[in-house]
Image (spheres, coloured by chain):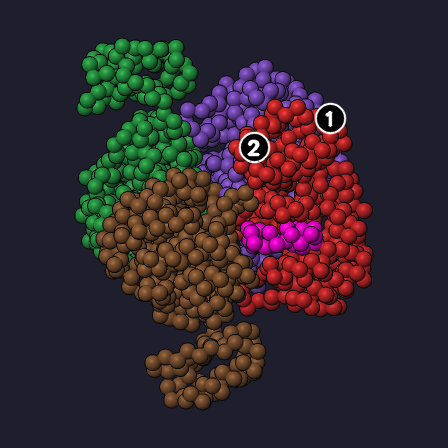
Chain colours: A green, B brown, C red, D purple
Amino acid sequence: MIIVLKPEASAEVAQELLDQIAAKGLKPLHMPGSERVVLGALGDERVLAELALEGHPMVESLKPILAPYKLVSREMHAHDTVVRLGKVAVGGRGFTVIAGPCAVETESQMRNTTRAAKAAGAHGLRAGAFKPRTSPYAFQGHGLEGLKLLRATGDEFDLPVVTEVMETADVEVVAEYADALQIGARNMQNFSLLKAVGRAGKPVVLKRGMAAKVEDLLLAAEYLLAEGNEQVILCERGIRTFETATRNTLDLNAIPYIKQKTHLPVLVDPSHGTGVRDFVIPMALAAAACGADGILVEMHENPPAAWSDGAQSLYPEGFERLMAALEPITAAVGRQLR
Amino acid sequence: MIIVLKPEASAEVAQELLDQIAAKGLKPLHMPGSERVVLGALGDERVLAELALEGHPMVESLKPILAPYKLVSREMHAHDTVVRLGKVAVGGRGFTVIAGPCAVETESQMRNTTRAAKAAGAHGLRAGAFKPRTSPYAFQGHGLEGLKLLRATGDEFDLPVVTEVMETADVEVVAEYADALQIGARNMQNFSLLKAVGRAGKPVVLKRGMAAKVEDLLLAAEYLLAEGNEQVILCERGIRTFETATRNTLDLNAIPYIKQKTHLPVLVDPSHGTGVRDFVIPMALAAAACGADGILVEMHENPPAAWSDGAQSLYPEGFERLMAALEPITAAVGRQLR
Amino acid sequence: MIIVLKPEASAEVAQELLDQIAAKGLKPLHMPGSERVVLGALGDERVLAELALEGHPMVESLKPILAPYKLVSREMHAHDTVVRLGKVAVGGRGFTVIAGPCAVETESQMRNTTRAAKAAGAHGLRAGAFKPRTSPYAFQGHGLEGLKLLRATGDEFDLPVVTEVMETADVEVVAEYADALQIGARNMQNFSLLKAVGRAGKPVVLKRGMAAKVEDLLLAAEYLLAEGNEQVILCERGIRTFETATRNTLDLNAIPYIKQKTHLPVLVDPSHGTGVRDFVIPMALAAAACGADGILVEMHENPPAAWSDGAQSLYPEGFERLMAALEPITAAVGRQLR
Amino acid sequence: MIIVLKPEASAEVAQELLDQIAAKGLKPLHMPGSERVVLGALGDERVLAELALEGHPMVESLKPILAPYKLVSREMHAHDTVVRLGKVAVGGRGFTVIAGPCAVETESQMRNTTRAAKAAGAHGLRAGAFKPRTSPYAFQGHGLEGLKLLRATGDEFDLPVVTEVMETADVEVVAEYADALQIGARNMQNFSLLKAVGRAGKPVVLKRGMAAKVEDLLLAAEYLLAEGNEQVILCERGIRTFETATRNTLDLNAIPYIKQKTHLPVLVDPSHGTGVRDFVIPMALAAAACGADGILVEMHENPPAAWSDGAQSLYPEGFERLMAALEPITAAVGRQLR
């Protein structure tokens, strides 16, 4: 329930109401605005009836939240959230490009790839230290050593770093080294991990699961916000369909849907969304055109030698072309690339 | 098999080879180029071995066609095909917008909707006279009367018209009134209809089926070209997936895939691809950004009163905004909107 | 609307009401039962209000039909429909096995395959004379000659024959030679064909489309019944999903759903439903266990030599094992195999 | 690589070869059979070449393992694995029924439901103490208190208990109270959890993810076996498709596929596989008919009052009917229900 107070309502009245909401076992929310204070009450709304808020002299109106997600909803929070990764803002007027290799492999691979990314204009660096792999016999990532190398590379080139965390026990250490914690598609409904990451106090990039409806993605984000973390970036990365020409089917319909329903920024990952290097640039442009707040894209100094995802990684030269092509498209939709 | 002749090969030699190919029960193709003549032979390539073409003094090289589709393939035909609908070209440098109501309803609905479309800059008019409807109790279209009204409206506003043909017996009459024949998603693998439309000698708009892989779409187009019709425009209009937030999942990955594999132009239908009016403009922009040759879009003078598809039809004012938004995006990718 | 008359209502009263319904532009239905007469009125139910039927002295009750399909619904027709193919009944207590090769190839292939089918206990023969093929270069069937050979083989072994019709123009000739007309998955929403087949007065086997919801299948069947043909058999044959281990995903959930919602019999095609010979028998048994009225199964005297669908066709020996395995399963669910 | 030794090879030779395999950084496997010893070597097979095993005097033959999964494959382990949950065997000749409510709610709910399950012939008890819920505001389970109550109920009615574990940190405590640890669909590719559960030394029930190909499921199981745990039971529970008539699409094709490719037993969950109470019995019968080793089924003393999944839970009376209906079907396929 959203509770709009009258302009003349005092801070004491607001606090008193929040206490009553909490006493009923509901989660109280305080959303002070420039003109009036709005309160929220999350949980079983039938209990609220007992407070008879509609008759309270300082309550202007009550509005039920219709969406199954609450904190994530635009009904609750009308303005776009901007998430800060170090000096970089995601959401708002800018269009953010976070690039890097699938996995942290070696010092020279990280340095060469990142130098190229930075030179072409990337705003952030991504690479995996803990890798979720379908087969137990595939390379599983360098773990802590990978994390340290990623951090060092980010610092050297002055780029914030994003990397995946795969389990609760690793949240603390990943939060120590990374500017944002990524929750991968396979863990989108790993609710224990969502809760732990929600409590870590770091920005989060939450990727959509392969069989997740957009509403499921928003409910997964709600787990993060319900733990008090509002620094959440969503990411569309393709869903599983019958089409086999591409690795996944990039669902760009999700972008205007997400922008309409929620205040959180959303990125598109055209690398996993297609699985084919040649299609990464056109789909990155499409993402920019339909309203995404940025992209998460795989590149590698030498894709054929990449330990994973080589087929969908851009060459440094391809990444340069991508940035050049994004320039007029982002301008056309009123966004700033640089 | 593609058979490249030497530059000095005469027209007689080419004809002789074509005759030999035909005599073996294969389909012969003649593709004269500016520098040399290329021949094609479609069918069971094992039979070709008997002609021992690799040893023929006027044959420069032989190249098998690897794709299951042949005439549709870029291997066979490297340059983009441009299809002409009256004065309008689809494919090439332009970006084509074909707009109109879902169905031909009344004279005033057609005139008011088309006037608005024309004023905002539409290049072509679309509307259904024969309507495929999931339920037998839904409005099935005005048939011949609808066709005549569509033609008259197109003529009045000087716009070429595209309309769906649903069965073999109607091909002739639809070809008489329309500038292009549309084959709908539900009939994409109605092979009898494909053959009949292929023989009609009119441009075709072939929509992708709801469960069709892109390769299936290209093979369906091959049916049209195999009948001698090269004036084929493909159309992505969304596929069926588990996502229920939108009517279909628009598969824009298909656009760069199609542009890579085939020489045929491709449109996107953001109306059926989303089913939601608010998402039509962003997805139309995304289509332009990723390389589509145009869009097929539903609009109506008064969508809430539309007899079908009202929820996904743009208002005239929305269509104006769409055209204005397309201008800088098409320019950004080097295409001309007007 | 379903209109239940009082037990004492005379035939004249019923006729009078049917005339009034027709006069309002609705489709009248007459459903005499053993205890009382039930009438139906299909179309815009608002018009019915003008007849004030609820006040008519001979009307016991009125019941709106909630499903989007009407004639197909159990609300309208509570008892199971039994469809007769020659001497064979589909629906009711029996479990019907219709077997045969994918396509009519040669006289000896038809005779050898059918002899084996008959010997093992098949009730009907299936084979295609008109073949829908994804590629225009694949074998398209023998057409009329194939039809004649199919008919002759069915007569020789005293088996009713089922075969696909692919276009309106062929309905008459296929109806002349076959005991039942099959509408293939790719034509499930070819509404022109549905109407023509609905008028042909022959039993129909309607296969579910690859992207069709079960409700779409029932609405497609409604097209057939709306033309006056109640001899309709539905067929589940697998849908398109992301799973690539099998050709399609056989959706057996559809069987209890269909049996609950409609009175029409339903077959399962485990050959197309799996695409893998080894899985045909287990899935045929599963179909019998969950309530299907029979199966449509591909077999061939020599599958590796089959012109199409060899990988999913049973050997004669496999078909014998299938029949032996079906015996106790059908008995377990109270159905009779022989 | 599978390495078959000659019948005369001694135990010392086998050990020597295993040591050499381990020294190359590969995982050695020892599979003594009744007639001869078979060894395995998992990992990069190119390294094996250096051992020149094909020339070893005691090696009879070498066979590469073609499947991407190894320990899970029938190529490696031809005979069916039987997993023991207390006194109950899963796999082999029996057909196992594990029943219970979605969640542990109260002592009386657990006792009443379990009494009914036991009376009707259930072999095991299932109920969730840690519940994965799409919304953070839904009931999340009683946690440790729920576990204790589940254990007590299982002991009272002498039934082994299966329950879900959702995170690495809980593996130990769940392993203390449960006879088998369930990994839910949403965690099928939570690789950290798979590894932790693989090391827990308890039988595991691994459910297929909603977007997981069967091959992905087998690779997830490989994670468990690679940690040394062979007590793994697979479970098909429905996948996400475009069909909305049922909660999921139960993919029974997966059953014969799994039985062909792997030696592990497989259950079917017709409750989540359909989401509709009326379809649970027919789909359970279908599962038995196509070769499943048992079912995992939801029942509740009073489904309308269930805190979750009430719509798909059987009443006690429905569960009795299920057991009665399974009797002849399991007998028909040569399995023993009791």
Going by the image, does D275 lie left or right of A183?
A: right
- Chain identifier of the residue bearing label 2 in the image: C
N-terminal-most mark, 1 or 2: 1
Residue drawn at the location 29% of the way across and 34% of the way down: A263
Going by the image, does D48 lie left or right of A95?
A: right
Residue A59 locus on image (x, y percent):
28, 14
Q: Which residue is mark 1?
A: C7
Toward the viewer: C196 or D97? C196
- Chain identifier of the residue bearing label 1 in the image: C
**Vertical order, D2 against C70 (above or below):** below
Residue drawn at the location 27% of the way across and 30% of the way down: A78
Which stretch appears magenta? C180-205
Residue drawn at the location 41% of the way across and 24% of the way down: D137
**Marker count (numbered):** 2
Going by the numbered disc 1, the residue's amino acid type is Pro
- Asked which quadrant contains residue B157, the reply is bottom left
**Vertical order, B51 against B159 (above or below):** below
**Vertical order, D168 against D156 (above or below):** below
Residue C159 locus on image (x, y percent):
78, 56
User: Callout 2 environment at 10 Å: few (<14), some (14 to 19), or many (20+)?
Assistant: some
Q: Which residue is mark 2?
A: C48
Toward the viewer: B178 or A19? B178
- Asked which quadrant contains residue C170, the reply is bottom right
| Disc 1, SS | loop
Residue A276 belongs to magenta span: no
Report how far apart the C-alphas of labels 1 and 2 lie in the structure.
22 Å
Going by the image, does A328 lie left or right of B104?
A: left
Going by the numbered disc 2, the residue's amino acid type is Leu
